[in-house]
Image (cartoon, rainbow, N blue to C red):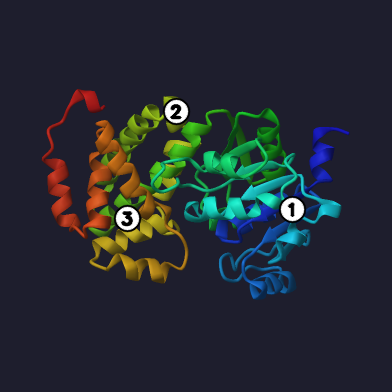
């Protein structure tokens, strides 16, 4: 049996039925025999199975018949017909708790691909590190790139990166997620891919705030390029490869997330700049904006290590202190420029 035949006949579990988890479940279903997607709400599971649509998150996508939703984890990890790959699509804030809770359902030989663009608050651990500590399987990888879920759902051409230290995990990601409109590139810089996906969320908040001011392309280009420099400085300090930030997982994701109203982080920044209160925005959003939590953890760590991140510092003041964007922009522009920061 070839590797392609193996994955064609495989079963996949998707943990999390938000926008991206639902889209990933559909993509995987095009390349395997069955996808079991876990949802917390029994009513939502029934609605997905009855209508083939996750109306709450991706109402425009009709799911393949090979996707089944379950609120019962025993059925997702059915011992008599177990899964070969698990796609993890939960917010970073619950990764530790949920991976600890789900660990008993794993055999240990499953491959795990996570699609979470965030870190563990307080510890600064990447999601792959958290999963490795809590799950019995060591073979873990990450999916990340310019992947706005609703655009992928509508079959607009897009690409992503699957990174892992295990070749079989990368091969599984390519076999399971590739389609005529979705291209999957291999990588081995797990640190860089995870940090790129995390850090760009902070800059997406900044970009949304900038756009709320009605500023033009010069301002946007300055923010993106200087923001990318911050991502590189921080990522390299954490052990990432510089080149990773120049590809899909870095500048590619930054361009998409920092330019689209489909991005939750972008919408948070735009609404903050218009004077709305953060708790009201997050309540209205109805889903996770990873950059809000990430900003404080990253900025405080950067300060303690002497990593220059002025834009991140401005977002920190915007999110945590409620500072005005009209005050933050002049303070950034007044900073002395240094060749060391290029």
Give how far apart the Cα atoms at labels 3 and 1 are: 34 Å
What is the crowding at mark 2: few (fewer than 14 residues within 10 Å), some, or many (at least 20)?
many
Circle 2 is placed at which residue position?
240
Spot occupied by residue 2 in the image (x, y as percentages of width and height): 85, 32
Quarter of the image for residue 238 reads top left
Residue 208 - label = 3
Asked if labels 1 and 3 touch by Cβ distance under 8 angstroms, the answer is: no
Q: Nearer the viewer, mark 1 or mark 2?
A: 2
Spot occupied by residue 105 in the image (x, y as percentages of width and height): 72, 52
Horizontally, residue 189 falls left or right of residue 83, namely left
What is the crowding at mark 3: few (fewer than 14 residues within 10 Å), some, or many (at least 20)?
many
Query: Measuring 59% from the left and 51% from the top, which residue is drawn there?
Result: 100
Query: Measuring 74% from the left and 74% from the top, which residue is drawn there?
Result: 50
Question: Visible in this render: residue 218?
Answer: no
Task: Tell me the element at label 3.
Answer: helix
Horizontally, residue 265 falls left or right of residue 189, namely left
Towards the viewer: 208 or 307: 307
Query: Measuring 82% from the left and 53% from the top, which residue is drawn there?
Result: 79
Comes first in the chain, label 1 or label 2: 1
Give how far apart the Cα atoms at labels 3 and 2 are: 27 Å
Question: Visible in this render: residue 335?
Answer: yes
Circle 1 is placed at which residue position?
29
Quarter of the C terminus within the rendering: top left
Quarter of the N terminus within the rendering: top right
Task: Tell me the element at label 2.
Answer: loop
Asked if labels 2 and 1 touch by Cβ distance under 8 angstroms, the answer is: no
Towards the viewer: 58 or 298: 298
Q: Is residue 191 above or below residue 81?
A: above
The single residue placed furthest to the right in the displayed view is: 1
């Amino acid at each position: 049996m070839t590797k392609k035949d193996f994955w064609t006949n495989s079963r996949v579990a998707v943990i999390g039925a938000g926008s991206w988890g639902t889209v990933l479940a559909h993509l995987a279903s095009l390349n395997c025999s069955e996808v079991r997607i876990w949802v917390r709400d029994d009513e939502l599971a029934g609605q997905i199975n009855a209508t083939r649509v996750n109306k709450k998150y991706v109402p425009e996508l009709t799911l393949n018949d090979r996707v089944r939703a379950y609120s019962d984890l025993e059925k997702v990890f059915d011992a008599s017909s177990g899964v070969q790959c698990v796609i993890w699509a939960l917010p970073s804030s619950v990764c530790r708790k949920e991976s600890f809770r789900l660990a008993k359902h794993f055999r240990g030989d499953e491959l795990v691909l996570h699609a979470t663009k965030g870190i563990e608050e307080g510890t600064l651990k990447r999601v792959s590190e958290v999963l490795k500590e809590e799950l019995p399987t060591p073979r873990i990888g990450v999916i990340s790139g310019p992947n706005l879920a609703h655009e992928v759902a509508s079959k607009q051409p897009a690409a992503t990166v699957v990174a892992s230290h295990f070749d079989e995990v990368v091969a599984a990601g390519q076999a399971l997620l590739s389609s005529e409109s979705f291209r999957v590139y291999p990588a081995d810089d797990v640190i860089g891919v995870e940090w790129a996906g995390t850090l760009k969320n902070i800059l997406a908040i900044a970009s949304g705030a900038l756009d709320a001011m009605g500023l033009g392309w010069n301002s946007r280009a300055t923010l993106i390029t200087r923001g990318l420099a911050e991502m590189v400085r921080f990522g390299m300090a954490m052990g990432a490869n510089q080149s990773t930030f120049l590809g899909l997982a870095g500048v590619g994701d930054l361009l998409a997330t920092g330019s689209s109203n489909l991005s939750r982080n972008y919408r948070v920044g735009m609404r903050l700049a218009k004077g709305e209160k953060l708790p009201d925005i997050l309540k209205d959003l109805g889903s996770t904006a990873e950059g809000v939590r990430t900003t404080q953890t990253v900025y405080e760590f950067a300060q303690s290590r002497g990593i220059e991140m002025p834009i991140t510092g401005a977002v920190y003041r915007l999110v945590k202190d409620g500072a005005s964007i009209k005050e933050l922009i002049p303070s950034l522009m007044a900073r002395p420029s240094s060749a060391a920061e290029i």
